[in-house]
Each structure stands twice: as C-alpha cells, then as structure tokens.
Amino acid sequence: MEHHGNCLCGEVRFTIKEAEPTVSACHCGMCRKWTSGPLLSIDAGSGKNVLFEGVEQIGRYRSSEWAERGFCKNCGSSLFYHGLEDDSYYIPIDLLDTVDQAQLTLEIMCDNKPEYYSFSNQTEKMTAAQVYQQFVEETEGTES
C-alpha cells in the first residue's frame, strides 16, 4: 500500500512506496523529547522505499551512534527516525494524508513510559532490554 504525506508547512513531501498501516509507539525519553509524547510511527522500510521532495528543507540530527532524526527546517515538524545501520525509516503516522486503516500494534521501551498516559487497545509490548536484544540479534545475523 502506497502512502503520501508532508510536514506542517508542506515544504517537505514524501511518498512511501509500500508499507503496512501498522503503527508502533516508542516511549523512550529521546522520542518523547523529540515529539513531546510517544513517537507514533509507521515502518517505511529502507531509504529505497521512501521518496522525499523538498530535501533542501530537511535537517538531520544525529541522536545516537546508530540513528538520526529528520525535521523540517521551516516549520520544525518531526519527519523521520532513520536507522543508519540498516537504512530503515520510521515516519510519524500523523504526517500521512490518510491514516484511516492504521492500527497501533506495538509499543517499545515500555519500561520508560511515564505513568501519566496509556493506550486502551491491546498491543505487543517490549522493554528496552528486549528491543536492544532484538537489535543485536538482527545485526549479528547480517554479519555472516
């Protein structure tokens, strides 16, 4: 399923060629500071699957050794979380033009979630240790 979206001012537009409308929530402190709440995103796959227009308006912030976060230089919208190791892109779900079919299915870094909010639907939940372990296993599997 193809998805289209843009930042708040419309200077940055994008097309995700193919992605399932499943949403994940990240409760880590960095994502909550970046978005002023949990990052609710869709897995857009690799950079080959995402086409950006208005790239001159995209700022990038290297938030860790393994990732950078993109934002619109004009309006400040959070545009993507980009995993550098595997070229993965996670796009905030509410930047998409249509989100009617989207369903929240996964919450990560649940042990970092503050008590003042919670989601009412049932989701798979992963702690920080589980997320890091999965990342290590995936990385080790690609080094052979």
Image (tube, rainbow, N blue to C red):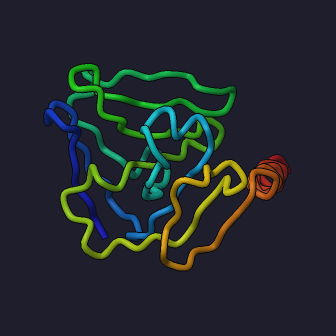
- Residue lying farthest bottom? 122
Quarter of the image holding residue 107? bottom right
Residue at (37, 21) in percent of width and height = 59
Residue at (52, 72) in percent of width and height = 105
Quadrant where the N terminus sits is: bottom left
How many numbered discs? 0
Q: Is residue 133 left or right of residue 5?
A: right
Q: In this view, does 50 lie to the left or right of 120?
A: left
Q: Which of 108 and 87 is in front in this view?
A: 108
Quarter of the image holding residue 83? top right
Residue 52's spot in the image, x, y percent?
Answer: 28, 38
Residue 56's spot in the image, x, y percent?
Answer: 26, 20
- Residue lying farthest front? 116
Q: Is residue 96 left or right of residue 134?
A: left
Residue 40's spot in the image, x, y percent?
Answer: 44, 54
Quarter of the image holding residue 125? bottom right
Residue at (69, 26) in percent of width and height = 65
Residue 86's spot in the image, x, y percent?
Answer: 62, 44
Relative to 24, does residue 88 appear above or below in the rendering? Answer: above
Residue at (41, 30) in percent of width and height = 70
Q: Is residue 99 left or right of residue 21?
A: left
Relative to 51, does residue 84 appear above or below in the rendering? Answer: above
Q: Which of 121 and 83 is in front in this view?
A: 121
